[in-house]
Image (spheres, coloured by chain):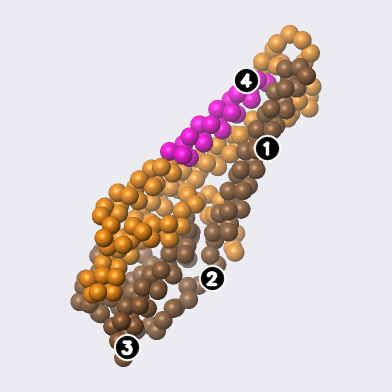
Amino acid sequence: MDFAEVTTVTALLASALGLLAVLRDVLSRLTQVRIGKLELVGEPRGIGRSPEEVAIEIQRELAALSMFSTSQYALDPTTRAQIDARLRDLERRLAGFSDATPPDLGASG
Amino acid sequence: MTLQQVFIAVVGGSRFELSDFDPLMHPLVDDADVHLQKAYDWHFERTMTAIRLVFGAAGAVVLALVTAVLKQGSDPTGGQIAALIASAGLFAGIGLLLSVRLRNLHREYVATLSYLERQRWMRQVLWNLGFG
């Protein structure tokens, strides 16, 4: 094999490996995408239920919000709006439940 | 899955999931924001290394093509030249994709930081009430 042949084979192999790595990464990212609206885990309000029930429900909802990828949360306006609305709702519930004041972090959401 | 979601998945800054930062949301963890920044710093460095690598590879392929054309001996065939140009283009394309992803990283970092702090506040309140 002369220089041109060796160079061509090496370059093609290396770029094919690079392409495979990118395709694998893209497929992996696509499997991270969560589709559909966030389902409400519990009741909208904690009226008539014990503090323990409300606390467990809020904890479950907090955990459920974390199923999204950070890029979907940051870059997809629909997902961002859904999660931020749920966070605001949980903050309100928790503020009413404990007299604590939510941090002023979600004003833009 | 919408086209927009596919696009975001491809050009998104990282492959982090919000749940990756669950341990940082615990009320007993100090300086969660610093740890989050560290995770993004590491990701930035890894991506920058990959960008330098693929652009370097693209340059090396072009250099090899020029050398093959200029050196004495048998000239590279048209197919070989096309394959080398395609290979260099592919490397450069991968580098560009990684650069676009890096450009989106700061938006992800800020959004994740806000999410983390809000989750931490709620978990802190629950913790203070004895529901940790």
Residue A69 location (% of width, % of height): 48, 58
Which chain hosts label 3? A
Which of the two discs, 3 and 4, sits closer to the camera?
Answer: 3
Residue A53 picture location, percent across and down? 34, 83
Q: Amino acid at mark 4?
A: Leu
Chain B representation colour: orange
Element carrying mark 4: helix
Q: Residue at x 25, y 55 (%)?
A: B30
Residue B81 or A32: which is nearer the viewer?
A32
Q: Which amino acid type corresponds to the residue marked 1 in the rendered image? A: Ala
Q: Is residue B50 magenta?
A: yes
Mark 4 crowd level (few <14, some 14–19, many ≥20, 10 Å Cα): few
Badge 1 crowding class, 10 Å Cα cut-off, few under 14, some 14 to 19, many 20 or more, is: some
Residue pointed to by mark 4: B63
Q: Which residue is mark 3?
A: A49
Which residue is denoted by mark 1 in the rendering? A16
Answer whether residue B122 is visible to the viewer in this image.
no
Which residue is painted at 40% across and 73% down in the image? A61
Q: Earlier in the sequence, mark 1 or mark 2?
A: 1
Q: Are marks 1 and 2 in contact (CB under 8 Å)?
A: no
Q: Read off the magenta span.
A: B45-65
Q: Nearer the viewer, mark 1 or mark 2?
A: 1
